[in-house]
Structure formats: C-alpha cells, structure tokens
Image (cartoon, rainbow, N blue to C red):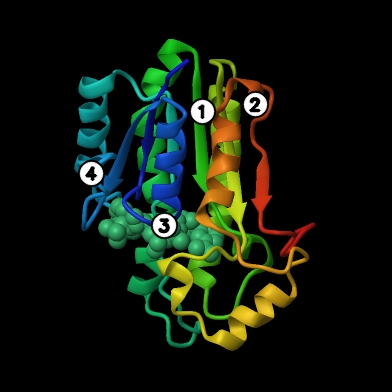
Amino acid sequence: MARTVLISGGNRGIGLAIARNFQKNGDRVVATFRSSPPPAEITGIKCDVTDETQVSQAVSEVESLHGPVEVLVANAGITLDKLILRMTDEEFGDVLQTNLTGTFRMARAASRAMAKHRWGRMIFLSSVVGFFGAPGQANYAASKAGLVGLARSLAWELGGRGVTVNVVAPGLISTDMTAGLAPERRDLLVGITPLGRMGTPDDVAHAVRFLASEEARFITGAVLPVSGGLAMGY
Ligand code: NDP
C-alpha cells in the first residue's frame, strides 16, 4: 500500500537515494531541501530544519498535498570538523542544531498525526561515528549518538500507538559529505571495513525502506548499521 513519505535533506546524496527508492516503490514522496531543489521527478519543499516555523510549515504542506506523513526519514545532516581546542560554541551548536534538534523538530511535527492514525515509521540517520568517535568530530559524533537516545525515548512514547522509531547508522558512504576526505583517511576507513569498499547511497536506502515496511512492524528502538562491517559491535 502506498504511504506518504517525508525525507529531510532529500535533494542529494543519501536522502535523494532514499526518496527515489520509496518513489520507485509507489509511495507518495516529498523531499525537503535547504539550498537547491531535488531533480524534477521528486516533489521538493524548501525547509531548513534549524527553523521551527519552516519545519511545521513543511509538514502541513505535505499533509495538504498527500495527507498525513506516515513515514518520516530524518536525514538532513552536516559536518563541521575541528579539534576540540579550536571548536567554538557556535560550531558545536550548529551541528547539534541541524543533526539532533532538527530531527527532534521533524519528529515532533510528524508524531501527532502518526499517533492519531495509530501507524507510523520514523527512521533517523545516525552514523557509526556516533559510537566509535572520530578525531575532529566531537560535535558530529555527539549529535549522532544523541539520535539514539531520542529514537529510543520516542519508541517508548509512541510504541502503543503503532509507531516504530529506528536508527540507521551508515559507515563510509560515497556522497558530497565524504568527497573531501583525505585519501589516506578514506583508505584507512575502507581498510577496516570487512566488505572492503565504501557504501553507496542505495545501500542505505534499501535498509531505510525495510525499516519503513509493514514487515518491520516488530522492530523499534533498533540501531541498524549499514557500514560494510565498519565499527561492528560498537
Ligand atoms: P550530503 O552532504 O550529501 O547531504 C546533506 C543533506 O542534508 C543535503 O540535502 C542538505 O541540504 C541537507 N541539510 C543540511 N543542513 C540542512 C538544514 N539545516 N536544513 C535542511 N537540510 C539540510 O550528506 P549525505 O547524503 O552523505 O548524508 C545524509 C545523512 O547521512 C546525514 O545525516 C549524514 O550525517 C549521514 N551519514 C552520512 C555518511 C556518509 O559517509 N556520507 C555516513 C554516516 C552518516 P542542502 O543541499 O541544501 O545543503
């Protein structure tokens, strides 16, 4: 059955692959974007997740286009890498605002209708970095680890209403976000990935769609690594 799916940051990278995957499956998909819109085949709504008004407006817009959001994929994220001695409050806060508070805002805006209709799926994009840490990524790792506590609390709050809340933790995936990695760092990370390669955005999209499916109905509060085994066991 077709569902209404909202993906934050769905104009490029992993978010776009997720949007295409759901759309191919016949779902009604809306992808939010902050700067440039997604390709023409995907419906885009402008929304900066750091702005509460834009988030609630985006969710209302989806509702008037396609009905209540049934699947929320909170994917929008940024990095702003610095060693702690150089990291300002602002640089720490900006990453938290987008990755963690932005997800909280999206989830809050979507949860009312999910609870009312007694069905919903929320999937948050974390990262293996949230569990094993990385030099220069204190802000990013803190935000991604925080998503697990957020998801598990919402799993408790909304479980009785048929809403599941899960986390996907990608390893190293080929997108704009990782394009600037120093080749030595990339090779080091691929070297500790048992499957011996970087992942693709599609690898992540398949896992997200599974967690959104009816078949995943007894899975909530889970963290699913999609990492080729990088950092397994953390
Ligand atoms: P990209 O940098 O390719 O894309 C990031 C997306 O987030 C863009 O759509 C961007 O929009 C959007 N975005 C950023 N800030 C905001 C904001 N304030 N409001 C709304 N949208 C925003 O990243 P990836 O596709 O690689 O990553 C997607 C998610 O997966 C992120 O949460 C990331 O942390 C996570 N992840 C990625 C990994 C990787 O190796 N690539 C590994 C682990 C996790 P715009 O185009 O307008 O800037």
Compute the Cα span from label 1 to label 3.
21 Å
Compute the Cα span from label 2 to label 4.
30 Å
Mark 2 element type: helix
Compute the Cα span from label 3 to label 2.
25 Å
The disc, 4 or 3, on the residue closer to the chain's N-terminal end is 3
Instruction: Name which residue type carries label 1.
Output: Arg
Q: Is residue 45 above or below residue 232?
A: above
The disc, 2 or 4, on the residue closer to the chain's N-terminal end is 4
Residue topped by disc 4: 40
Q: Which mark is residue 121?
A: 1
Image quadrant for the C terminus? bottom right
Mark 1 element type: strand
Q: Report the mark closest to the observer, 2 or 4.
A: 4
Compute the Cα span from label 4 to label 3.
16 Å
Task: Confirm or deny contact between disc 2 and disc 1 (CB under 8 A).
Answer: yes
The residue sitting at 59% across, 43% down in the picture is: 167
**Figure disc tally:** 4
Instruction: Name which residue type carries label 3.
Output: Gly
The residue sitting at 37% across, 29% down in the picture is: 110
